[in-house]
Image: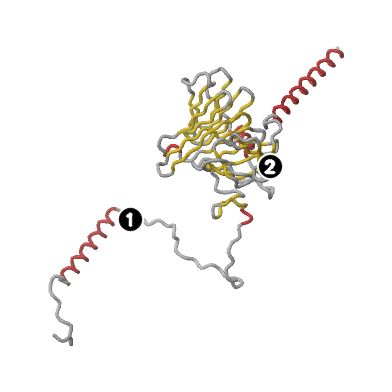
Amino acid sequence: MKTYKGSLIFINILILTVFLSVYAYGQSSLLPEGLDIKEKYMPGVGPQVGRVLLVQGKAVIIHEEEEEGFWIMKGISLYKGDKIVTMPDGRVRLGMNDGSEITIASNSDFSIERSSFDRAKRRFSSFLKLSVGKARFFVKEIVDRRHPEYKVKTATAVIGVRGSDFISGVTGFVTHVTALEDTELEVFSLQYPDQPVIVTDFNQTMVVEGELPTDPTIISPEDIETMKRDFVIILDTGEEEAEEGEDEGTLVEEAGVLIPLDELVEPEGPALPEGYEEPEGPDIFAETIITNQEEDILEQEIEIGESIIEDTIDVSEELPAFPGVPE
């Protein structure tokens, strides 16, 4: 009996060791072997399609058809074909020209296959790829734009975005897609592109390689909050940044730049005497309610006033000459 238990423990340890080895290899292989990573960032080729909003830890960006990478820093530009790889401690938030925001979690491989935005025609086209890891996509006003084309491809699925906030996770040959608030997605398997599944608020589907997407299932609020934690970025101050769509938080926008809330400085006014109290003024938020009858009376008073003015002064008659003016 003791021999059986000892063998079982040994087998479990062996399985765990193999799993961790495979996992570690998978994470280290996210970057091309022998990639030269430089500190000084160099822009890519073509028009800018977005920029890096926030960075936590380490992440690498590789431009299309280039054999060197750059450590990602806040504010750098993004280009078509850029590949972003986050390290085990890395998280990155991207702001795209079309108004969407993408937060890439740790140990992820993400690429910008295509991203174009015509501001005048309010038309955009984005095709993104999540090879492994997790990413959260927040797409603004997509339902109000003409001919929206916003798609995310994984190893097993394609997600067509109708709006507007969702999380995708890719592990091996399995893709999980979770829709958050006010969201509608069209998810289909790469093997069955003509049989999509519609996923709406707080529902999740799973796509295994070669299989149809599973029927959407409801995700509990607790699980949703747990998922969101993978996309919270810790600032250099040690505080957490504000989540997308929230008005309150430690990050605020000042002159187009995101800065910690505690760095804002209120303008100083003149010193007030001790014991001074702000005088009470009228309530500017009080609503004035006018009934239909009161509106009729008000209109009648205006009409009467206008008729009196017209009867008193006839502008059609020639006015007498001003006294003292020579003829």
Q: What residue is shown with label 2?
A: 38
Tell me where residue 101 appears, x and y as whole percent.
Answer: 54, 40
Q: Is residue 19 left or right of residue 192?
A: right
Q: Nearer the viewer, residue 15 or 23?
A: 23
Q: Nearer the viewer, residue 267 or 93?
A: 93
Instruction: Give residue 290's mark.
Output: 1
> Which percent across, then down, holds residue 168?
58, 31
Secondary structure beneath disc 2? strand
Q: Amino acid at mark 2?
A: Lys
Residue 132 disc label: none
**Numbered disc in front, either 1 or 2:** 2
Numbered marks: total: 2
Residue 312 is situated, as x and y percent measured from the top left of the image, at 17, 72
Q: Could you tell me residue 48's position as x and y percent?
A: 53, 43
First-in-chain label (1 vs 2) = 2
- Residue 224 sits in quarter: top right
What's the residue type where badge 1 is placed? Ile
Q: Is residue 17 left or right of residue 141?
A: right
Residue at (82, 18) in percent of width and height = 10
Q: Quadrant of the N terminus?
A: top right
Q: Is residue 272 left or right of residue 20?
A: left
